[in-house]
Image: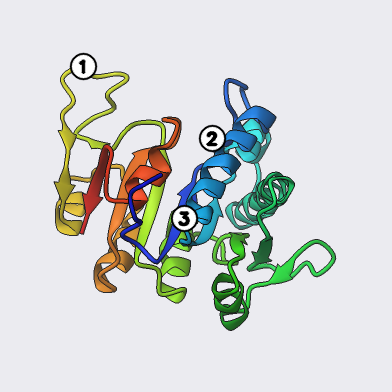
Amino acid sequence: MSEAPVYRRVLLKLSGEGLMGDKDFGLCTETVNRIAEEVKTVHDMGVELCLVIGAGNIFRGMSAAASTIERTSADYMGMLATVMNALAMQSALEAKGVSTRVQSAIPMNTVCEPFIRRRAVRHLEKGRVVIFAAGTGNPFFTTDTAAALRAIEMSSDALLKGTQVDGVYSADPKKDASATRYERLSYQQVLAENLRVMDTSAIALARDNKLPILVFDLHTPGAFAQVVCGKGTFTTVE
């Protein structure tokens, strides 16, 4: 790509559902590999990259069972599911020659590193992709909040959220044909209008630390690289 990136370091937040492809739950290998290729393209542009991946693809598949499980335990199960997604993405990236480290907020030294901020920063400086797993390590916090927290801890220039649509809409465009797309929003607008960008904790964290959030369509080929270069279609929250 001829354009130069406008960001030096970014955190990409992916939903677990984004890895399902057309499956009902679980991982779609083709989708994981395609997203890994998008990440590799941006990495090859010299951008320092970290990722946070949700767990909806695994945990929603167990939702009937989860409904009877106490909330704290269910949240910990969701955190473990994010580790599985992180390891899958690490495998896909390393198969493409991208050096990758997984750091978990819940220590599990057999499969990945514990989250250590200074070590994560060093990995980024050495050109490695870092995938943060297990959320914040605490129940009652979503992976959205974990993404905002890790982006701030890593001094990221922006938090990019890859979704199923090309930005933020006033309503679900797949259900409401009259939904309007926003080009730019303030944090306060998102909170006041209850727009489903990220949860309120994540928006408040981003606002308090002046972290811009860019929402784009994860499934448009090349969209991630375009957004990093300030091009393409996306919604900016700042």
Q: Residues within 10 Å of mark 2 (few under 14, many from 20)?
A: many
Q: Secondary structure at mark 1?
A: loop
Q: Position of residue 174 (x, y in %)?
A: 32, 20
Residue receiving disc 2: 17
User: Tag 3: residue type?
Assistant: Met
Numbered-mark total: 3
Picture quadrant where residue 63 is located: top right
Give the spatial CA distance, label 2 vs label 3: 27 Å
| Mark closer to the chain start, 2 or 1 | 2
Between circles 3 and 1, the one closer to the viewer is: 3
Q: Position of residue 190 (x, y in %)?
A: 20, 50
Residue receiving disc 1: 177
Q: Position of residue 144 (x, y in %)?
A: 44, 54
Q: Are marks 2 and 1 in contact (CB under 8 Å)?
A: no
Residue receiving disc 3: 45
Q: Is residue 198 visible?
A: no
Considering only vertical position in the picture, is 103 above or below 175? below
User: Tag 2: residue type?
Assistant: Glu
Considering only vertical position in the picture, is 81 above or below 113? above
Who is closer to the viewer here, 222 or 144?
Answer: 222
